[in-house]
Amino acid sequence: MKREKKEITCIVCPVGCLMEVIMEDGKVVEVTGNECRRGVDYAHQEATMPKRTLATTVRVKGGILPLAPVKTHVPVPKKKIRAITELLAKVEVEAPIKINEVIVADVLGTGADIIATRSIPAKAAGAVS
């Protein structure tokens, strides 16, 4: 039986509890140091399958700006962040773009959509870059 101890700082609320997570054979068996139930849930997720919300940019063709800020609409597995950023580096969208518009649906099968976090209007006709 493999026993492992991890220290995790909870980010669910402003308290920032320092929690100790004891794992046996890859499963959480004990969480201490939390001040609320949400901390226990966070510790379980962070210890077994950490997730993050990714914020980055994609290229825009014909927009007043060359890049559009985007993010995942829900957190994605931390281990897929690099692959998602590599995929998004190849994405170019056509202006206009509206805030919350889905840029990439279900990115890499994660269930997360990549959405625009800002509207980008198209350049006016005859505008020079």
Image (spheres, helix red, strand yellow):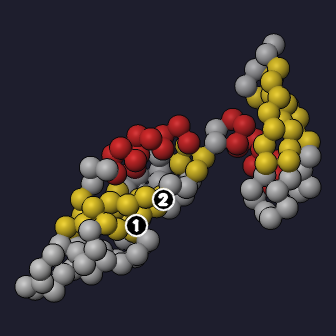
Could one spot residue 108 in this view of the protein?
no
Residue 124 found in image quarter: bottom left
Residue 104 x, y percent position in the rendering = 34, 57
| Quarter of the picture holding the C terminus | bottom left
Q: Which comes sooner in the sequence, label 2 or label 1?
A: 2
Residue 92 occupies quadrant: bottom left
Q: Which of the two residues, 55 or 37, is positioned nearer the viewer here?
A: 55
Q: Is residue 53 left or right of residue 69?
A: right
Q: Residue at image x 89%, y 57%? A: 36
Q: Mark 2: which amino acid? A: Ala
Q: Which mark is residue 69?
A: 1
The outermost residue toward the left is 126
Quadrant that contains the N terminus: top right
Can you see residue 128?
A: yes
Q: Are marks 2 and 1 in contact (CB under 8 Å)?
A: yes
**Residue in the image at 41% along x and 64% along y:** 70
Is label 2 in a helix, a strand or a loop? strand
